[in-house]
Amino acid sequence: MDPTRKAPNIWAVAGITYGVVIAVTVLAIIVYYYVAPKRTNSQSRDDARLVTVGSVWMPMYPGANIASTASGKTDNATESTLNFETKDPADRVLSFYQGELKKGVFRFNTVTPDAHGGTVRSVVHQGKTVVVVTIHAAGQSTQGEIRTIDKDTGDKTIRD
C-alpha cells in the first residue's frame, strides 16, 4: 500500500451509501405506484366479505344482499343455510364460488352447471362438513343458497 495515499473518510462513504439506498427506495416506490396494475372492485378480496354458515367461514359474493339464514339439527347432523340475492348474472356468481371453493380448506370441488345457474359442492373439516352452493337466475336478479351440513361425530372440536 502506498504510504502517501490517504484513507477514505468513512463518514463520507457511509453518507453516500445511505443516500443511494434512500434514493433507490424512493424511486422503487414511485415506479411501483405508476407501473403496478390497479385492482378493481371485483378483484378486491375486501369486497368478498366472509360470513359463517354452520361451522364454515364462507366468502359472500361481492355486492350480494343476505335474504335469510336458517339452521336446524337432526339426530346426526346440523344443516345451516344462507340465502342471498345479487343483480349480477348467474354464471358470474357460479364462477366466483367455483374459484373460491378451490382455495384454502375446501376439498373435492364438484361443479354442476345448468341453464339457469348451477351448483358447486365441496367438503371441508376432513370430510365432516359438506358445503353446497346453489345459484339460479330469477328474473332480473340471481339468487343463491349456501348450505352446510355438519355431521355430528361426537367430537366437539372441528379442525381443518
Image (cartoon, grey):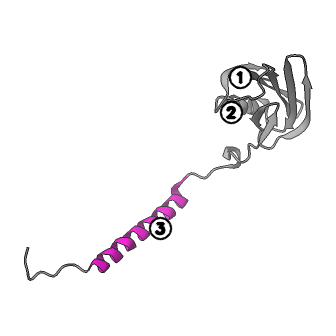
Q: Position of residue 10 (x, y in %)?
A: 28, 77
Give the residue type at disc 2: Glu
> Is residue 138 left or right of 11 when viewed as pictured?
right
Q: Which mark is residue 26?
A: 3
For mark 1, what is the residue?
A: 123
Within 10 Å of the Cα at label 1, are there few (<14), some (14-19), or many (20+) other Cα atoms? many
Give the residue type at disc 3: Val
The stretch of residues the image draws in magenta is 10-36
Q: Which residue is located at x 8 percent, y 80 percent?
A: 3
Cα distance between the residues tagged 3 and 1: 47 Å
Cα distance between the residues tagged 3 and 2: 36 Å
Q: Image quadrant for the C terminus?
A: top right
Q: Position of residue 110 (x, y in %)?
A: 69, 19
SS for tag 1? strand
Within 10 Å of the Cα at label 3, are there few (<14), some (14-19), or many (20+) other Cα atoms? few
Q: Which mark is residue 146?
A: none
> Is residue 17 left or right of 97 when viewed as pictured?
left
Q: Position of residue 33 (x, y in %)?
A: 55, 60
For mark 2, what is the residue?
A: 100
Q: Earlier in the sequence, mark 3 or mark 2?
A: 3
